[in-house]
Amino acid sequence: MARRSKGLSAVRQYRLLLGKDLRQEFRTLDLLSSMLIYAVLVIIVYGASLATGAADADIAPLSGGLLWALIVFTSLLGLNRSFAHEREQGALEGILLAPLDRGAVYLAKATSNLLFMLVTEVIAVPLYFFFMASGVTASTVGWLALVLLVGTVGMAGIGTMLATITAHTRGRDVLLAVLFIPLIFPLLYACASATTAAIVGGAFWMDTYSLGLMLAGAYDAIMLAVCWWLYDFVIGA
Amino acid sequence: MTPAIETTRLCKTFDTRRAVDNVSVAVPAGAFVSVFGPNGAGKTTLLRMLVTLSRPSSGTARVAGYDVRKQADEVRARIGLVGHQPMLYPDLTLEENLRFFARLYGVEGPDARVAELLAAVGLKHRRLDQVRTFSRGMLQRAAIARALVNDPDVLFLDEPYTGLDQHAAEVLDDLVDGLVGKRTVVMVSHDLDKGFELCTHALVLARGRVVSFGAKQDLGADEFAARYRAAINAGVA
């Protein structure tokens, strides 16, 4: 007779799946190294092109948008590779064969993607502001960190869902980008405007910032709930 | 006695093509069923529905007494699958892989179970090596260990001998021999001699339909061979 399950809770399943993703990544550093290298290269390209084309211009109003462009494309790179280990020897089917809460599978993958994106941002964002010589002061660092966190949570959640859909398709790299960018557009717009408000400052910067953050937070909540709810169907298909 | 597997008018349709067409079979507990048929006969599609990886388009299937659609988690807890891929994480060691899956199934005493399986498949000496470094034969043995981690009532083997050299096939023979009579086994095979030698029941499919299903003792090798030839002559789906 089969060894019966101890009735593993969804939380324990989540911790097991997340632990496996982290162990695997810290052993190979596949995802983190490629995301970091890509981010640094984009920053160098930004620096070089702005130094030659807009040396005397005030780039502070642009820096929020440029920062989010960097984050979006770096995240896409990571998301595209987030199912590489599962694809290689069919391990995703091994997971699907186990009596698991599919919501836990989604949350674990989204969390690992979020952590890898945050680690990349912790290194890349200070570099970005250093090279861009933008006027970030100590008082705005906290506000920037908050909007980065809210935006990254949404991108990890939406991106994990889409990466699952595209994991076994041909041309998945392009397909993920085509699906991901329109779907995160409201989030991107809200985060970029909040980030720019925090960097530029001004009399009413907090109003713009709060509105952007609120919109981003609300979009996160709605999209994460939808993704979590749909995941069982998506991963089964 | 409840059959280990029971399907009633089971169908799977892809667009307009019927890959599995009205399959109704009842497999007694403890049987070893070999599934034969030409390429495209629907063998793997049938298997994927029975292991809950694919949803039936119509009809019903019960495995280990549970409905594959309505009680998928109950089915999953009681089955194992050795598929075309090993379903392991290549950058984790074999021991880490097996421990991960044992915990995922909520197996009590996962470390002891892993040690037991490593000894059973003869890979104890490679337990600390990353799965990526394994040969095809070792991968197949590792896949069998993974499939047995929850001590399943019903084990599904999808062409387990494919790509194995003589020695690896002999090692696998011993492993499969050890399973006979201890649990219900369903093996998809292209090797008529080996499949017929091992089985207690033979199922022949062609164009998604059952051509023949019965106990080996009732069928006889000659009659089976004749029916299989008829299935081949029916053409590739």
Image: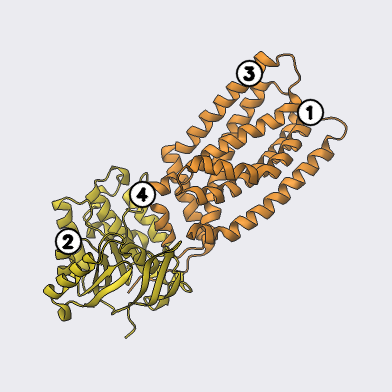
Q: Secondary structure at mark 4?
A: loop
Q: Are marks 3 and 1 on the same chain?
A: yes
* Percent position of residue B13, x then y: 43, 65
Q: Contact (CB < 8 A) between labels 1 and 2?
A: no
Mark 3 vs mark 2: give the one in front. 3
Contact (CB < 8 A) between labels 1 and 4? no
The residue at which mark 3 appears reads as A49
How is the structure coloured here?
Answer: by chain
Q: Along the polypeptide, which appears first: circle 1 or circle 4?
A: 4
Q: Earlier in the sequence, mark 3 or mark 1?
A: 3
Note the chain letter of the orange one.
A
Chain B's colour is: yellow
Q: CA distance from mark 1 to mark 4?
A: 49 Å
The chain that hosts pointer 3 is A
Q: Relative to the observer, which residue lies in front, B59 or B127?
A: B59
Label 4, on which residue? A89
| Badge 3 and badge 2 in a common chain | no
Q: Is residue A190 above or below residue B39?
A: above
Q: Which callout, 3 or 4, points to the residue nearer the camera?
A: 3
The residue singled out by tag 2 in the image is B173
* Residue A222: quadrant of the picture: bottom right
